[in-house]
Image (cartoon, helix red, strand yellow):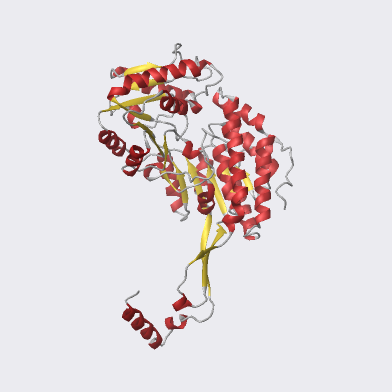
Amino acid sequence: MSILEASASVPAQELEAPTIAGLRAAFDAQRDAFAGDRNPTLDERRRRIEALIGMMLANRQRISAALSQDFGAHPVPASDLIEVLGVVGRARYVLANLEAWMAPIPRETDPAFLGTSRAYIQSQPKGVIGNISPWNFPFDLSVGPMIEMLAAGNRVMVKPSEFTPACSALLAEMVAATFDPTLVQVVTGGLEVAQAFSALPWDHLLYTGSPNVGRQVMAAAARNLTPVTLELGGKCPALLTPGSVSAVSVESVIGTKIIKNGQMCVSVDYCLVHRSEVEDFVDYATAFMHTAAPSYSRSDECTGIISTRHLERLQALLQEGRDHHARIVTLERDQEVDPTTRRMPMSLVIDPDQDLGLMREEIFGPILPVVVYDDLEAAIATINAGERPLGLYVFGDQAVADRVLAQTSSGGAAINTCAMQSALPSLAFGGVGMSGMGRHHGVEGFREFSNPRGVFVRGEGDMIDAFYSPYAKAAAVVQAVLSSGHN
């Protein structure tokens, strides 16, 4: 059945959250469909990805409207750039490289023992893949990984977040109008649906979100021996090495921090600044906001905090800093929070105590702790004292940056900028330790969602029969190898 056979207009009642039994039926239908089409051709995979591109471009304005509805406020250019064109660019990169990725990968053999035999890795579709996607980038993190999943020849089911109901409903409608449900399907719903989703016997499962929920997803997957990819975020630091504080470096840190108003897993969660340059950092940050983003939290440039509960949590973190006499610098002249659109000003917290909540928890909002250090080794020790982050950002010359990267560990890294390691379609994206496991994006994403089947093809002139009884020939081979000094 063609992926484009579904009606372009899907009745709303068909998009309601399925029952648990309906979820299992949808999964079984995809499994049955995969059993009848285990290895889609290059042309068929390309058609599926091209359909996905058309889906995103045709719904660009509706995507922007849904984001604004769920977040209370969301800048339209950011919706277009990240949630639409970012996905489209990723898909076009895959289309340009898919033929090469699908080709067998030759592996070396030993001609002396194996003659003209050959070996290769064949990238084989895994089957039916689940994706539990988060609320902060409802389309980028739902449709983006789908590209490599489809490129690898799989069928896909997505469970988007219930915290972005407008985006989730639109995503379900878009997918239903573009793909046959036995190829791609979106299932919406709350906690019970999410728990049932993670318990299905997937051929692979991707989860993006918090470490606490990641543990639950991994435990559910383990019951079926389902391989998982976990993207879990964490407290991503930006280290400004001595002498690197400048208008450009601070613009990169603050500019990244205000993307999605801090609600981004690769955002700067805290920065480390040499004691001698702290005031310069504050001055540059203030100047940047006053010049580039005046009245930021009152403007169309600012994304609303996802929920009132999350907004209250952020305000509590900031208040805890005040209660412990931390110096707080609000980077706006108007310091009020707008409860209607849930927009909150950007604030720096200078040299906070390490036991404060904002230094223990991933902030996910417009609060930036500035940790003061006296020497570079102490700054590196501070980074290493925490869990390994999803991203690490280092500012300074290449030699110093290389030194920092050599002494730390993170899922990804960027030098003299922030977060770009997550935006490049060709660069593997993922975490390490508490920030996750596995990779998507680019060829690593294609490989993540493929089974690397090793294939051996027997040729002529080999000594394979040395493995068979009687072992007189094997003894002669062993003696010859030992005598030659090779193994």
Tell me if residue 1 can be seen.
Answer: yes
Residue 98 in percent (x, y) is at 60, 52
Between 275 and 142, the one lying in front of the other is: 275
* Figure disc tally: 0
Residue 57 in percent (x, y) is at 67, 36
Question: On screen, 148 above or below 211?
Answer: below
Instruction: Single out the residue that lies furthest toward the top.
Output: 333
In screen coordinates, is 65 left or right of 137?
right
Residue 123 in percent (x, y) is at 55, 59
Between 173 and 250, the one lying in front of the other is: 250
Tell me if residue 159 can be seen.
Answer: no
In screen coordinates, is 141 left or right of 388?
right
| Residue located at (52% from left, 22% from top) | 302
The quarter holding residue 18 reads: top right
| Residue located at (50% from left, 20% from top) | 342
Question: On screen, 97 above or below 395?
Answer: below
Residue 67 in percent (x, y) is at 58, 28
The quarter holding residue 166 reads: top right
The quarter holding residue 351 reads: top left
In screen coordinates, is 24 left or right of 482?
right
| Residue located at (43% from left, 43% from top) | 214
Between 222 and 481, the one lying in front of the other is: 481
| Residue located at (55% from left, 44% from top) | 145
The C terminus sits in image quarter: bottom left
Question: On screen, 209 above or below 252?
Answer: below
